[in-house]
Amino acid sequence: MTVFDRLREYRRLARVACSLLTLPRARLRFDTAIAPTKIRSQYELFNRPHARFPLMKNKTMGIALIDLSNFKNSSEYLATVKKKDYAGHHARQARKRGYTVRRINRNDHVAEIFRINTSSENRQGRPMDLPYLTLQTEYEEGPPMQSYGVFNAEGLLTGYCCLGMYGNFAATDRLIGLKTPDGAMYLLLVEIICTLIDRGQVDYFMYDTFLGAQPGLKSFKHRIGFQPFRVKYSLI
């Protein structure tokens, strides 16, 4: 790398840093009353140094959040994603094709989950992580985790989402589905978001980060309503 290349890279990083510092802020709270050991473990995971940017904590900059407290009910949220090519549009198309969403116990769908996990060798430009490629015959269910699945018209599980209910926020832990043009994953997330809003249990919903995400994934998150935030965590 030449001196000029280094200067361009430093300038690019400086622009990224400036844009991150201007992001809206959110205060997310981990509540140990939910599941003391697991909640503390997740709190430490979210606050450890970032793998690529060690001067930052793991999940603090450019975090993809929806501020659920902005909506009185799920209808208000749906109104923000109803235009063509946004999540509401894709979710409606998936429903017309017979897709449905419901809460699941992953232990009832071991073979289907393994089929989904191994349906593609690469996702987001990199090989699948080993845990997805290894058949897991038993899953630990219960607080703080919940699982939801999206099923096609034949009743086959085509995608699933595991999310942690950590305190005043929920966050995706695993989100993966078969690659289809049917809008099933949009439907899955829209239904989860609507459920969280109508139950009023949490203020925020997190789907990892915009920082370092591939353009396609950034677009997917934006169409669902996620926006980048700066986040500070507390533990109670």
Image (cartoon, rainbow, N blue to C red):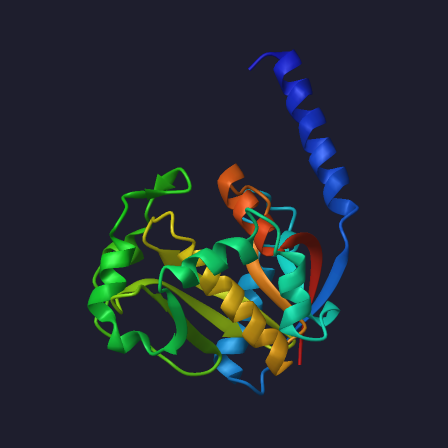
- Looking at the image, which is closer to me, 214 or 17? 214
Residue at the bottom extreme?
A: 33
Q: Is residue 74 visible?
A: yes
The one of 220 and 11 positioned closer to us in this rendering: 220
Considering every residue shown, the one lying at the far right of the view is 22
Side of 137 relative to 152 (left or right): left
* Quarter holding residue 123: top left
> Seen in the image, is 126 located left or right of residue 173?
left
Location of the C terminus by quadrant is bottom right
Query: Which is more toward the observer, 30 or 161?
Result: 161
Q: Residue at x 50, y 63 (%)?
A: 189
Q: Is residue 136 above or below residue 13?
A: below
Q: Position of residue 6 (x, y in %)?
A: 63, 19
In the rendered image, which quarter is residue 230 located in? bottom right
Between 91 and 29, the residue placed more toward the observer is 91
- In the rendered image, is residue 186 in sight? no
- State the residue at coordinates (27%, 77%): 107
Residue 1 placement (x, y as % from top left): 55, 15
Count of numbered circles on the image: 0
Q: Residue 151: x, y in percent? A: 33, 67
Residue 199 x %, y %? 60, 82
Q: Is 165 located above or below residue 44 in the figure?
A: below
- The structure residue drawn at horizontal position 48% and vertical position 59%, both measured from the top left corner, is 91
